[in-house]
Amino acid sequence: MKQAEPIVQNLLLLGGGHSHAIALRMWGMNPVPGVQVTLLTEAGEAAYSGMLPGHVAGFYNHEDCHIDLHRLAQFAGAQLYLDRAVGLDLDNQRVICANRPPVAFDWLSIDTGSTPKIPDGLHDPSFLAAKPVRRFLEQWDQLVAAIAQNPAQPITIAIVGGGAGGVELALTTQHRIHEILQRAGQPRENLTLHLFQREAELMPQHSSWVRDRCRQLLTQRQVQLHFKESVATVKLGKIHCESGLTVECDRLIWVTQATAPDWLGQAGLEVDREGFVLVDDTLRSSHPRVFAVGDVATMANHPRPKAGVFAVRQGKPLFENLHRSLQNQPLKPFRPQKRYLSLIGTGDGSAIATWGRFGWTSPLLWPAKDWIDRAFMRRFSDLPAMETEGESHNSNEPQSSAASPSNFALRCSGCGAKVGS
């Protein structure tokens, strides 16, 4: 048996976002000898945002749309620490955690996602934020269970945010709850749905055809639309808008512009106006040993919307540039596509597609999206079998930042790329 390489570098992946999931899978098939990888994330599973609307509509269960990070970390030979990052010490190259000792790194990649920008006045038990996706899906499942237990009780749900995410959630939310009411023999009128949009129209970044089609569909389904309305506070089940409009609701779903944690900029990383880490074309931040991807990052030369499609596309170039950094090789630039296909699920097994200025709708679009999403998730459930000498550390307990040579997992580097090791 070959002698294991001693650990000489520590690569810390902060966050279990889509880019890191892809990079971990690729690392498992092509690791760099002498590098210990650690994944630091809040939970042992990661929700795939592409399946969020389908889960809300009732098409997917929990297992369908979550990536098992325990299994993925083990496959990659990585340590897994379950904790929340609350700070970053760049001088000493370590991440400050909420509950465990700081985690040291030689190289750091950040993929912690984003959270909606929530006004200070929103402190109400009825509040649900659409991000982080994992937490939202947990709260959504609890809401669905409560409605199913008492379907005769009328419920009013308000969605704040008239972008593609808010429109899609309105349509899929209505479809799911209408199904529950129908099975229970209750009238659809037991559900009242409001959608608040601070702009004068829905989805201002999309084509006029898509905007008109979505507005028409929401109106047909009797969703109450409120344009040019900004929510100021929510108290005792009442939404108070800046205009003076007051609407009673039982649940509020917040789907607005995202923001990033303050500690990224406070640590000294260069950030944009919203606090997202600015990165160059190689996905590297202003610090030479720190990368950032997904929603938490903004490409300085190629700004794009905070959409999961871009996080997925960044997985491979991130892996390649981390590989190159660890081996002192020059980095490769990555240029994201300007146009991308966006599919807005309507909750009834159909979808609206948008590509630049073009849009169309068809019942064939949702099955196509379902096939694409399921194929993506199979990449993390159908992992190639690899023999290892040791197992990854899946624990919240403090552990050494450097693993011993006996714990370094030996893997074939060839089967994943279909080339000789």
Image: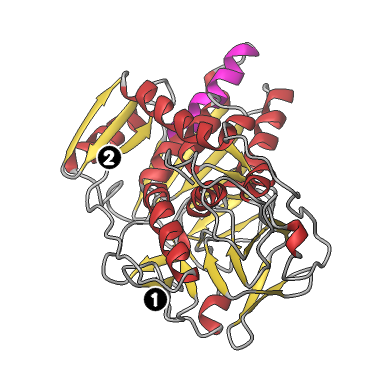
- Amino acid found under the numbered disc labelled 2: Leu
Where in the figure is residue 16, as x and y percent of width and height? Answer: 58, 54
- Whether residue 229 appears in magenta in the rendering, the answer is no
In the rendered view, would you say 285 is above or below 55? below
Checking the image for residue 273, the label placed there is: 1
Q: Name the residue beneath numbered marker 2.
A: 341
Q: Residues within 10 Å of mark 1 (few under 14, many from 20)?
A: few
- Amino acid found under the numbered disc labelled 1: Arg
Where in the figure is residue 323, as x and y percent of width and height? Answer: 46, 62
CA–CA distance in space, label 2 to label 1: 27 Å
Q: Toward the viewer: 53 or 64? A: 64
Where in the figure is residue 101, as x and y percent of width and height? Answer: 78, 74
In the rendered view, would you say 209 is above or below 100? above
Q: Main secondary structure of the magenta part?
A: helix
**Residue 254 seen anywhere in this rendered image of the structure:** yes
First to last magenta residue range: 171-184
Q: Toward the viewer: 231 or 400? A: 400
Callout 2 secondary element:
loop
